[in-house]
Image (cartoon, grey):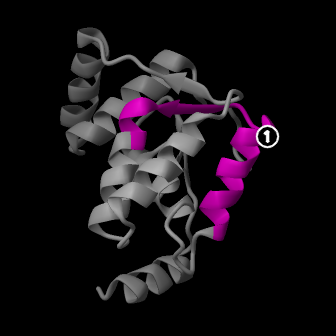
Amino acid sequence: MSEGPYLFDVGVTAIAHSGTPVDETPLSYVRQAIAGEIDAIVPYASVIGAHNVLTSYYGVSNKQASQLMQNFMDSKRVHWYDGMSEEVVRNGFSQASAVNIGGWDGYYAAVAKSEGAKTILTIDDDFEKISGVETNVILSPEEFAILNDYLGY
């Protein structure tokens, strides 16, 4: 495993709560975070994003997704990042434009750096373009193929 603290990207939280055939690896990270076995940083914005992914792509009802995210938010051992300051957002856009990634990815990279995360746990290899933090893409190519098949892609 890469070095922590770990910033959780939207995809990790969403898949962990999705009930898909590939949810075990992301769920193991969520369980470790809840138990305090790893130092996890989770932006509140990513929990909202995970809710959107659960309801839009994984067929989870709004009610169930809301309950799942609220239950996750009850964890007291997770470092919940509640900031969206102008400085962090601007740094995120600078990251995004420098390596040609999306604005949300740039924001999460800026949060990781500002909060001292050593590794971003993600399903998105775009973070590998960011200097100063490690990237741990938590799904194998085989798991991505299973997920894409499950989603009908």
Question: From which residue to which does the magenta span run?
Answer: 24-47
Q: Is residue 95 above or below residue 69?
A: above
Image quadrant where residue 142 sits: bottom right
Residue for point 67% across, 51% down? 29
Q: Position of residue 46 (x, y in %)?
A: 40, 40
Image quadrant where residue 139 sits: bottom right
Residue for point 41% across, 46% down? 127
Q: Position of residue 84 (x, y in %)?
A: 31, 18
Residue for point 65% across, 64% down? 25
How many C-alpha atoms fall within 10 Å of the one at disc 1: few (<14), some, or many (≥20)?
some
Q: Is residue 56 above or below residue 11?
A: below
Disc 1 is placed on an element classified as helix
Residue 126 lies in the magenta-colored region: no
Residue 41 lies in the magenta-colored region: yes
Q: Position of residue 55 (x, y in %)?
A: 32, 62
Q: Is residue 126 above or below residue 82?
A: below
Q: Position of residue 143 (x, y in %)?
A: 54, 78
Where does label 1 land, which residue? 35
